[in-house]
Image (cartoon, rainbow, N blue to C red):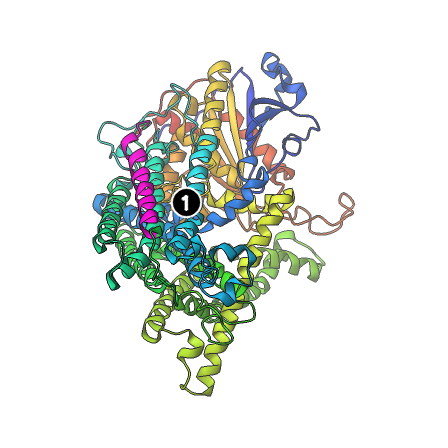
Amino acid sequence: MPPVTQAPQSPGPALELLVHGVGGATPQEMLDDPRPVRVTGDATAAIYRRAGDMDAEQYPERYRDQPIAEAYCWSNLTSGNGSRALWLLLLPFMVVNLAHWMRPTARRRTRAVRLYGVLVRLVALSLTVLLTAAACEVALDLVAWQCAGVPDCSNRRSWLGFLSAAQGGWWSQPGRRLALASLVPTALVGLLWFLSNRTWGAYESQRPLTGSEPDDAAPGTPHDLNTSGTAAGGRPALSRPGFWYGRRLVARLRAAHTAAGFLTVAASVVGAAARHDRAVTGPVPEITGRLIEAALVLGALAVLWVVCRRGRSERRLDQRLDHALITCLPGAALALLVLAAVYTAWSRPDWVSAGALPGDVTFSIVMLGQAALVVVLAVVSLGLYRRTPEPRTVIYGLGGPAVAMLACALGGVMTGGVAQRVADWLDGSGTPGMGRNATIEGPPVLLSWQASVIPVLLVLLAVPAVLLLVRTWLAARALQPEVDLEYGQERPDPARTRQIARIRATAALTDSAPWILGPVAGATLLLGAAAVGGAWASGEVPGLAMEGSGAFVESAAEAAQSAGSWMVGLGFVLFVTWGRRAYRDASARRTIGILWDVGTFWPRAAHPFAPPCYAERAVPDLVSRMSGWTGQTRGRLVISGHSQGSVLAASAVWQLPAETRSRVALLTYGSPIERLYARWFPAYFGPAPLHGLHGSVHCWRNLWRATDPIGGRVRLDEGPGPEVDRGPLKDPLVYGRTPEHPLPEPVLGHSDYQADPVFAQERAALLDRLAPALPRQADGEGGQETPRAQSLSGDL
């Protein structure tokens, strides 16, 4: 390695591009200016400057002591208008989409990685079927079949009068009631398609500027992202030109999931009519129902083929669309649904609705299929992890299967909660399923078993939670001597010491999240299987199934069923209430936006109905601004990212051409890049990609605090020279009252890193190390640099 030399100073201007983190920040707060001016962008995401800095490039001598400040505000991408509160309904879709990106690091395991992607997409497809089946259960079974077919129930609901079997109207026949009720789940599927299509155009359709794409690897780069986390030639996957532009896959998946929804509604509508025609001789030939059911099977196979056939293609900007597929597949499924509705609505005067539709079979098949897919996904993930083990990867590479299981549990709780609450509302004072003053049979028995395992799951969850609390208390006590030694107080204040130690110990709980998620996912899988087995074996709700098993067992089963039903109902009510409040209240909407800040960073690779990926708008915005500004001014630029903004900043730097990267420095603080993203998404932010990022960017500095529950170290082993990490920064800056600080200093934790003098020092050091021009970096194996670039980046 050649001796370190001082980089020549750039005579051009210097710019600091600020990127805020989760929860958002206003440009007034970021720039400390009451009236900032928008430089470029729109009301959704834009770049702002102070009014006095609008012509700063023409007077670089005014900015010798500090750079020009710009603020990129992207908070409206996740917490803008009130309609975004409806995204809460898409929570299971968002969670399963995260599972796609949690794959362990894999090298030369093309088939296993592709299988991982296929399995996650199939789990995502099952969630769409589950949501649609729940809507069919409510509209078709509980309302149209059960309540409208029982006079005691329909007479109490005036809006059901025209459907009542007792009145004998045109709509009173069961088939016609089912055909009319199918409009509700059909409209739901259409709404999901519309939202997915509209949000793609508003958020994710941002193409990079011409000529701003990073230098891609040589021709042997795998066509499908699922084949490798790192492109050929050692470039990280996030540097691929098409990583933040997944138009083709989203369009294909949107068509497949929309068709799956329509086919689920069609199967729910036609099933009862086909069974009736096979049981009796009526005006409709039996063969008609069989032909429609065969067409439904062919449609389901077509959907499975589309979902399994292709993953993400990122080697280049893929702008192709499979127009025939995305038009014909949903259209054919909708036409089949219309045909099924017409067939079911055909007059059958002797047909009477009794009991309930066979929803137990549908929900059981979906739940068993989800469990099987998660188990196979766990086997594949564990195999990938064992081939390329990375010690800090969570749950030994099983983070993806655990999160997929969590998505299935969320989907089950949401759908079961809706069905049970509607059944209780329709039945008035009765208890559906228990035979106590019940006028309708109620929802499928499996949903009651599913609710009954929730109290058991909470009891099991309490064990690791208590252990973590005890460990945190012991860690806080052990940290107290270290705090006193750090601040060097002759007379330490025990209360102040305990406060600082407690905050540091609590901040470390973030690293223990896998010890909660892992047991929860495993217990959910086992309890879900037990619920399916209990429902199949007994055919009754738990309270009735355990009769005769002893007083204790009977009371425990009834208590679990009642408590679980109450918890599911309360959760659903809180869910709706929270969404309604967020629709009206901007502050509540901002809180929900924080959830989306973390969950919707990744593109929609598994589920097209998930909330839109804001990074597919934000990353091209940042890349375009950095490329355009440095190209016009030939100046130096520091992109400064806090919290989630640091992840956006790093992703944007990955996308820059080598010429632009030579003029860009990266400053991150409160950053979850390693602590959260590298551990949970090792294939994209693991040690190898982060080393590649450090090798490609000119210089990088990361600030962190021990009191920060989100940010942490980057943990890059750089050899000789200063490390990327600077910390832990002292927090609070002053221990107690002093003449210079007569009032107590707050513990800042994750916020206000700019208040620390170290921030300005490190920003100035980064600008000093930026040269006006550097030799083009060679992107060799593992992201190697030229000796000149190594010597410069080794300074910091």
The total number of labels drawn is 1
Question: Quick check: is 305 in the magenta stretch?
Answer: no
Q: Residue at x 67, y 20 (%)?
A: 51
Rendered location of residue 72, percent (x, y):
56, 30
Residue at the top extreme of this rendering: 58
The local secondary structure at tag 1 comes to: helix
Q: Residue at x 46, y 87 (%)?
A: 551
Image height of 299 relative to 515, above or below? above
Rendered location of residue 698, percent (x, y):
43, 28
Principal secondary structure, stretch drawn in magenta: helix
Q: Residue at x 35, y 46 (%)?
A: 262
Rendered location of residue 375, percent (x, y):
29, 59
Residue 423 in view of the camera: yes
Residue 6 in view of the camera: no
On the picture, is 390 further left or further right than 191? left
Rendered location of residue 142, percent (x, y):
45, 61
Q: Which residue occupies the foreground of this view, 719 or 557?
A: 557
Image height of 148 relative to 78, above or below? below
Question: Quick check: is 328 in the magenta stretch?
Answer: yes
On the picture, is 537 further left or further right than 720? left
Query: Can you identify the residue that label 1 sits on?
Result: 189
Q: Quadrant of residue 71?
A: top right
In the rendered structure, which segment of residues is drawn in magenta?
Answer: 319-344
* 10 Å crowding of disc 1: few (<14), some (14-19), many (20+): many
**Residue type at mark 1?**
Val
Q: Which residue occupies the foreground of this view, 678 or 421?
A: 421
